[in-house]
Image (cartoon, rainbow, N blue to C red):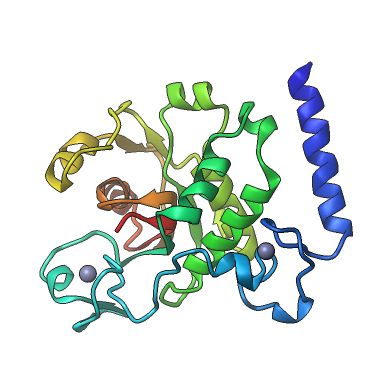
């Protein structure tokens, strides 16, 4: 019963948000409609967004930590990433995962009562951040957008896949196909927290499997909330390549630096 009430409240809040002019998800101040075209404009006012640690644009498209040294395809890489093979053409996040950004991600990922208890403000902010990350991606746009899947057991526990909500929103906003079912998580891997790059790679090896009959279009975006070393995203990309995709870009909300 409680969850039905929560859902009704959530729907009501969504309706009110639609009818009223945009307000900052953090402080509630009205936001000028004039800022449209800026992915963050409908979600946060200038004061509140200044508290987020936005990642710069003139950085390596794979690690976002170092200045670019060379072009690889349509993206720029730093010296270290240029010498490393990756199944991803780019791996892009909007903000550094710390401070306010970390708070928003937690509000989004760990709501009180599963999907029905989702925090609409956090959803608004993360949707804006995922669109901002996508605005940094190399052209042309993808034909398909997929989330990093959760293992069915984790999905049952949590009630929703945060990455799938973000991927669906992003696909709609750019007019691409959203497909959460092409890929399955077949191994319930232990948490990656505290593991180094090599250990993370081993931890997620073989964790994903394509739907047996999946034939994918060439250009696919993979969506996740937070990227750390990129091991999970690289493993997802390798599996999508087996299905025929060959230009793969990861789009994330935040990056651990
Ligand atoms: Zn504000
Ligand atoms: Zn790099």
Question: Height in image: 127 above or below 191?
Answer: below
Residue in the image at 49% along x and 57% along y: 144
Choose between 207 and 119: the one closer to the eye. 119
Q: In which quarter of the image is residue 186?
A: top left
Question: Height in image: 215 above or below 87?
Answer: above
Residue 133 on image: x %, y %? 47, 66
Q: In which quarter of the image is the N terminus?
A: top right
Taking 210 as reference, is 17 left or right? right
> Is residue 42 visible to us here?
yes
Q: In which quarter of the image is the C terminus?
A: bottom left
Question: Height in image: 134 above or below 233?
Answer: below
Taking 174 as reference, is 90 left or right? left
Taking 23 as reference, is 164 left or right? left
Residue in the image at 83% along x and 32% along y: 8
Question: Height in image: 113 above or below 232?
Answer: above
Q: How many marks?
A: 0
> Is residue 222 visible to us here?
no
Choose between 74 and 128: the one closer to the eye. 128
Residue 114 on image: x %, y %? 61, 28
Q: In which quarter of the image is ligand 2?
A: bottom left
Residue in the image at 29% along x and 61% along y: 88
Residue 90 on image: x %, y %? 32, 67
Which residue lies most toward the top here? 1
Residue 199 on image: x %, y %? 14, 39
């Amino acid at each position: 019963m409680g969850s039905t009430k929560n859902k009704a409240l959530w729907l009501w809040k969504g309706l009110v948000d639609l009818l009223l002019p945009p307000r900052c998800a953090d402080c509630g101040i009205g936001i000028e409609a004039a800022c449209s075209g800026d992915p963050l404009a409908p979600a946060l006012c200038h004061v509140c967004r200044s508290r987020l640690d936005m990642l710069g644009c003139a950085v390596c498209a794979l690690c976002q930590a170092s200045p670019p040294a060379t072009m690889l395809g349509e993206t720029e890489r730093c010296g270290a990433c240029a010498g490393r093979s990756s199944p991803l053409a780019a791996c892009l996040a909007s903000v550094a995962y710390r401070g306010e950004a970390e708070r928003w991600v937690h509000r989004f990922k760990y709501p009180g009562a599963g999907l029905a208890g989702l925090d609409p403000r956090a959803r608004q902010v993360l949707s804006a951040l995922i669109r901002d990350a996508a605005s940094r991606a190399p052209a042309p746009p993808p034909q398909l957008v997929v989330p990093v899947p959760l293992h069915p057991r984790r999905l049952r526990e949590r009630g929703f896949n945060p990455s799938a909500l973000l991927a669906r929103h992003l696909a709609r906003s750019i007019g691409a196909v959203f497909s959460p079912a092409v890929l399955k998580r077949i191994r319930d891997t232990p948490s990656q927290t505290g593991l180094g790059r090599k250990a993370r790679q081993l931890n997620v090896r073989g964790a994903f499997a394509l739907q047996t009959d999946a034939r994918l279009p060439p250009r696919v975006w993979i969506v996740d909330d937070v990227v750390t070393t990129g091991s999970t995203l690289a493993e997802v990309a390798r599996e999508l390549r087996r299905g025929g995709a060959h230009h793969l870009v990861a789009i994330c909300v935040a990056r651990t630096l």
